Amino acid sequence: MPDALSIIVVEADRERAFMIVDGLREAGNFDIQVISEAAGLARRVQARDPDVVLIDIENPSRDMLEELALATGPKERPVAMFVDRSEDGLSAAAVEAGVSAYVVDGLQPARLKPVLDAAIARFRMFQRMRIELAEAKRALEERKVIDRAKGMIMKARGIGEDEAYALLRKTAMGQNKRLADVAQALVTAAGLLS
Amino acid sequence: MTGTVIPAGFVPLADAAPLIIAQEIGFAAEERLTLDLRRAPSWSSLRDMLAFGQVDAAQMLAPVPVAAALGLGGINAEFSVLSVLSVNGTVIGVSRRLARKLAAIGHRFTFDDAAAAGRDLIAAAGRDLRIGVPFPFSMHAELLKYWLTALGLAPPQEADIVTVPPPLMADAIRSGEIDAFCVGEPWGSMAVEQGAAVLLLPGRAIWSFAPEKVLAVRSTWAETESDLSSRLIRVLWRAGRWLSDPSSRGLAAEILSSPRYLDLPAEIIERAFSGKFTVTPQGQQRQTAGFVEFHSGAAGFPWQSQAQWIALQLAERNGIDRSKAVEAAGRVFRSDVYRAALSRTGADLPSASSKLEGALAGEIVVAGESGPFNLLTNRFFDGRVFDPQAEC
């Protein structure tokens, strides 16, 4: 059994870094370190000389790691590269999920796979959480706007809450629009007129 | 959405303008195309997005597809360059500390003399010069290496060229991690606005006709989608023509400033288009003609000789056979595809696909496929001439 792979995770967001580290711990026995700052990234990675570096594709500092690709010259083993091209499906999945991996020391693809699988799973989970949070926020915003529109209609027409809501719904259906969009249009128009 | 949708990637820079303008002003729609524009956070991620099919076309640093063809940089993908997107457009800046040293030895910051600026820079900084560039494979890195080596300070032994993402350039120079940078606009001007840097030179002072960004596609895509490739080339040519009209500058800067694209002030973006720069945090102004070129002088034409110049610089540093480099470069820049796409449109097309690089001290009129047109000044600051014939 070879020694535990050493992995550096480059991630500024603490929570996210924890999540990735947890995911990696579940996937195997790795020696994991987290770097949270962009300054001198390539230098610090080089100093620690890990087997694998994991970084978010959205992180602009990723370009700093490309330098390592040239650090030891093209004649030696592949140094720093985007996930091994022999696993094309895995590379594409990694790009989809937003994770990029640098193999700092030429490494068997088979040893890299569990690392990437775990990282991809965690990145996906984080993306999903972010989308769900954004959707929950939007739903809340929309409910607020609908309530305001309802209130305006009730006041302007002197009708009850249920009736105002029914009117909004009917208008939305008649115009083939979303309820929240019709409500927003009303609130905006009222803002312009007042 | 009009016609065929092409997912296309860009990095937030002033010279992403041709792609953004092509979509926003409607040149894409004229060819029944919609560019689904995706902003990429870094060059390596844009390269990977293109390699793995998340986008079909991408703004790219001119040396990236050439490096890939030479097997450099860890990615094993084949890219084709359909068009040059922009010529020149980078700026060299120094830290305020280094600017004070330069002033102390009498440098006058004229913003146009690469030989004088380089000599003074070397005298002021000594041998520990650290310069930031956006990416290891970039015209920024090539220009700096050419410039400093010619003046007797050869990187990497005598000066460090390190990678710093453009949005972090101001921080890196303020914190002393780098002493100078070469970066695409508006990031040089942003560093000045943030009080971190003084601009020393436009990149064009080193090579006045340097291919900066190109439109890259996967080589397999260029083969199977030859009709889309042609339409894309025509769209970008029209966008470049629109951008070359001085009356377009304000609107172009306004469009690029939107949160979807650069998300930076239009006034700062416009400096690249007008060539009117604020070079010091105190507000000193310099004017430079032709800071970035999108159209004139057949700027979009992907010359074989441009690719060969890049390939030979890379080959020399990485111990790659010269004839192999020249051959690989010839496959990457698709002069033939570009020519076919624009024949019979009245576009200026040179009759040759290769030229001497660095041999034009001023504009000259040359014969073209559809009549004579002007080639712009093409000169290296040290007067050297690159003859691709001599390399074959």
Image: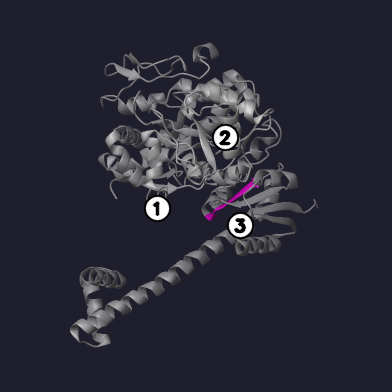
Which residue position holds label 1?
B259
The kind of residue tagged 1 is Pro
Which residue position holds label 2?
B99
Residue B84 in view? no
Q: Main secondary structure of the magenta part?
A: strand
Give yes or no for residue A98 being in the magenta stretch: yes
Secondary structure of the residue carrying tag 3 is loop
The kind of residue tagged 3 is Ala
The reply to whether the C-beta atoms of the residues labelled 3 and 1 are less than 8 Å apart is no
Chain of the residue displaying label 1: B
The kind of residue tagged 2 is Ala
Image coloring type: one colour
Chain of the residue displaying label 3: A
Q: Can you give x and y, in whole percent of width and height, for residue B198 in the image?
A: 52, 37
Q: Which residues are magenta?
A: A97-102
User: Quadrant of the image for the C terminus of chain A?
Assistant: bottom left
- The quarter holding residue A24 reads bottom right
Which residue position holds label 3?
A12
